[in-house]
Amino acid sequence: MMFAELKKSLHAVFSQFGKILDVLAFKTLKHKGQAWVIFEDANSATNALRRMQGFPFYDKEMRIQYAKTKSDIIAKADGTFVPREKRKRHDEKGGKKRKEQLDPNQAAAGLNPSYAGAYGATPPLSQIPYLGARPIVPEAPAPPNNILFVQNLPHDATAMMLQMLFNQYPGLKDVRMVEAKPGIAFVEYENEMQSTVAMQALQGFKIQQNQMLITYAKK
């Protein structure tokens, strides 16, 4: 699994709970199998922690807790930021490190350790909104069935990313991307009741800057 895909997948899964300021993951041995999701507010982080605890992420159940230290981006926002070098000297001067407190703005997720060693270099976070493909509006709506037609996905969306999103709802059987037409996919459930629940829950869900458009697939 590519490192960039990991961050995009985490962002896609957790963004349903609130605005995400950053997603951090490292390939070092010390942080193997760990990642940090930084929300704009504590309520979003708390909701994510409760709802996603034990959620299957790359075939491994996530273990989520509040991060032990405040992130730089949050500290800068509330005016408590101290450069790491000054922080280190202050701790050494005091003789012992201050007791770390849990930061409710961050949800720290434990990921599948078997993938941690395969992470590549951290890519720069893009500040440019990605528009992706325009929705392809069907000529006539298809009747309810067990297969969903998903449009307006970012071109770099992956089947694994969609599988994690739609796997929150029971009955998921398969996710198929259309390589010849980036921006669309088919998501199959065991029956139309299950596909309907997923469609209603994820209709308009944003991946990056793209709002998903979900309809029943034509058979």
Image (cartoon, grey):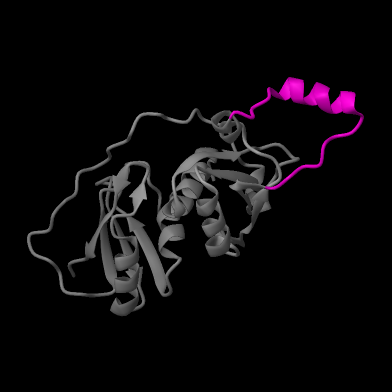
Q: Position of residue 200 (x, y in %)?
A: 30, 67
Which residue occupies the foreground of this view, 209 or 98? 98
Q: Residue at x 36, y 77 (%)?
A: 190
Left or right: 172 in relation to 23: left
- Residue 75 sits inside the magenta stretch: no
**Of all residues shown, which one is farthest toward the front?**
79
* Residue 161 in the figure: left or right of residue 43: left
Q: What residue appears at the point 62 percent right and 45 percent down from the top-left corner?
A: 35
Give the quadrant of residue 176.
Answer: bottom left
Task: Work out whether 166 lies above or below 104.
Answer: below
Residue stretch rendered in magenta on the structure: 79-102
> On the rendered structure, is 134 left or right of 123?
left
Check the image and report above or below for 193 versus 215. below
Quarter occupied by the C terminus: bottom left
x, y (%) of residue 186? 30, 61
Disc tally is 0
Q: Position of residue 106 (x, y in %)?
A: 60, 46
Q: Residue furthest right?
A: 95
In-front residue for pair 23/118: 23
Q: Nearer the viewer, residue 183 or 96?
A: 96
Residue 41, position in %: x, y? Answer: 51, 46
Membership of 83 in magenta stretch: yes
Residue that appears at 35% across and 76% down: 194
